[in-house]
Image (cartoon, grey):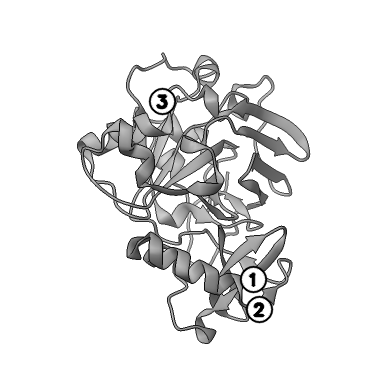
Amino acid sequence: MRFVSFEFGGQRGLGVERAGQLRGLTADNCDHTVDLGQLIAAGPEELLRVGRQLADGPEFDPNAVTFLPPLARPPKIICVGLNYADHTKESPYEQPDYPTLFARFATTLVGHNQPIVRPLASTSLDFEGEMVVVIGRGGRHIPKARAHDHVVGYSIFNEGSVREYQFKSPQWTVGKNFDSTGGFGPALVTADEVPAGGKGLRLETRLNGVTVQSASTDDMLFDVATLIETISEAITLEPGDLIVSGTPAGIGWARNPRLLMKDGDRCEVSIEGLGKLINPVCDEVRTEGMTGKAA
């Protein structure tokens, strides 16, 4: 199934997308939660039951709804850096032999067709197309051989990165966590519709219609099972956690001249079998009470 979180008529909704058709229910018209994170936590049987009910619900025009991130507030968003060798070569780093892990926060998330915001603080907003792994069953010390059993599904991410701030310190946290810089969606595609571990899927990023990244998820240095085993060695994974699995070569910061996202741009990330995430780009608007100088 392909679960889509949306808003319609001022109500949050949850739907199932099939062949371009979106059917579902809004919070004021159903007897269950429309929070996908809560359904994942309730277990696979409940998720399937609700999914079937949503698929029999009324049809919504995809052009009339506001797409939301599939999960609004994931318990954890764990990102993986330097997970494609070609991307490491274009970066100022040596290839690590252990996954480069860092955190993102829920305030960075924006849905499909919603704008990624270039902040006032900097013009160095870059694109990174990535596959998202969504944890369905939590645990600690998860062995690699059983790691795929803990995945409920997959999605798409555009990890907008403010490079100037990413490189201000050895820790990447600030540059990866400006508000409204993380495109996420449009759907959570359940694991049964995707090859195990999201293997062999073509990932492409386009900026204003021009392909800027193209790779296979087979090129990941640390595959999904390895990431789950490694992360859970230290951190308890919970239902609804996201693992944003890394980006291939082609980022704008590594180009000469640099190719960075700006107001009016349109960035698309497509992954075979998962769909296409589209985000326009806009400049942050100064609001009352803000101080300082725009970049």
Q: Residue at x 52, y 45 (%)?
A: 121
**Residue pointed to by mark 2:** 58
**Residue pointed to by mark 1:** 23
Q: Determine if residue 154 is in view.
A: no
Name the spot of residue 252 as percent of width and height, x first: 63, 29
For disc 2, the neighbor class at 10 Å (few under 14, some 14 to 19, many from 20) is few
Identity, as a three-letter code, of the amino acid under mark 3: Phe
Q: CA distance from mark 3 to mark 2?
A: 41 Å
Q: Quadrant of residue 68?
A: bottom right
Name the spot of residue 158 as percent of width and height, x first: 57, 43
Closer to the camera: disc 3 or disc 1?
1
Name the spot of residue 15 as percent of width and height, x first: 58, 68
The label number, if any, that marks residue 222 in the structure image: 3
Q: CA distance from mark 3 to mark 1?
A: 36 Å
Identity, as a three-letter code, of the amino acid under mark 2: Pro
Identity, as a three-letter code, of the amino acid under mark 1: Arg
Q: Residue at x 45, y 39 (%)?
A: 175
Q: CA distance from mark 2 to mark 1?
A: 5 Å
Q: Nearer the viewer, residue 148 or 176?
A: 148
Determine whether label 3 and label 2 are within 8 Å by CB.
no
Determine whether label 2 and label 1 are within 8 Å by CB.
yes
Seen in the picture, residue 41 relative to 268 is either above or below; the reply is: below
Quarter holding the C terminus? Answer: top right
Q: Nearer the viewer, residue 218 or 71?
A: 218
